[in-house]
Amino acid sequence: MILALVVAVIAAVFGLIRGGSLDALSQTKLRWLPLLFGALVFQAGFDLWNPDWLSDTGDLAVLLVSHVAVAVFFALNWKLAGMALAAAGFVLNVIVIAANGAMPVSQRASELAGLEDVGELGVKHELLDDGTAVPWLADVIPVPGTGKVVSLGDVLLAAGIGWLVYRRTTAMDSEDAEEARPSTPRAASG
């Protein structure tokens, strides 16, 4: 999530340098935005509440239900610039989490990123090992000096969000071009 936020800010800065505006970005028409926020609140709520009766399977179910809501949000906004790329990254993350029950994290990548205590990964992460399914989709890309390790899915998700922010900041979307085009009546043939 931090990676996506950093990339979005950088994209906005580049968009502004290229003559764009934050007003153009704020005019982005995202369909069903409450679905995205609802998924985040649902997942964060269970993370904070962490009821004793919720098993590991229940934790995974909460994660996957919130991810389905996010996937629906991506599907509803498919035509916006960058959304297909962001959705692809999101799907890759869902695949590896569903296949393993959590996001596997490479110990070596964690050490390269500067993460000191790899044992404290949290409920949504586990150490990558020989039994990890689709390990190339796991958190295996170190971001040195940050203590963060990201996945290919995270990179694609952040790139898609960055592309959306840049394109919307510079208002280069085909939707804008059509809205800006004056409507002229067609000449009658004859």
Image (tube, helix red, strand yellow):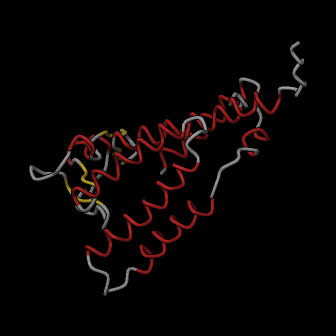
Residue found at the very far bottom of the displayed protein: 53
Quarter of the figure with the C terminus: top right
Residue 90 percent coordinates (x, y): 41, 48
Q: Which residue shows up at 75% across the image and 40% down it?
A: 22
Instruction: Give whichever of 53, 117 is nearer the camera.
Output: 53
- Along the line of sight, the residue nearer the viewer: 10 or 114: 10
On the image, the x and y values in percent for residue 69 come to 48, 61
- Image coordinates of residue 177 in percent, x first then y, are 76, 27
Q: Residue at x 27, y 43 (%)?
A: 137
Q: In the image, is 51 to the left or to the right of 57?
A: right
Q: Residue at x 69, y 29 (%)?
A: 174
Q: Indicate whether 90 appears above or below 155.
A: below
Q: Which residue lies furthest to the left in this view?
A: 130
Left or right: where does residue 186 sit relative to residue 16? right
134 relative position to 4: left or right? left
Answer with the quarter of the image where residue 36 lies.
bottom right
The answer to whether residue 12 is above or below residue 118 is above
Residue 123: image location, x then y, percent: 30, 67
Residue closest to the far front: 190
Task: Please give the count of numbered marks on the rendered protein.
Answer: 0
Q: In the figure, 190 relative to 181: above or below?
A: above
Is 120 situated above or below 139? below
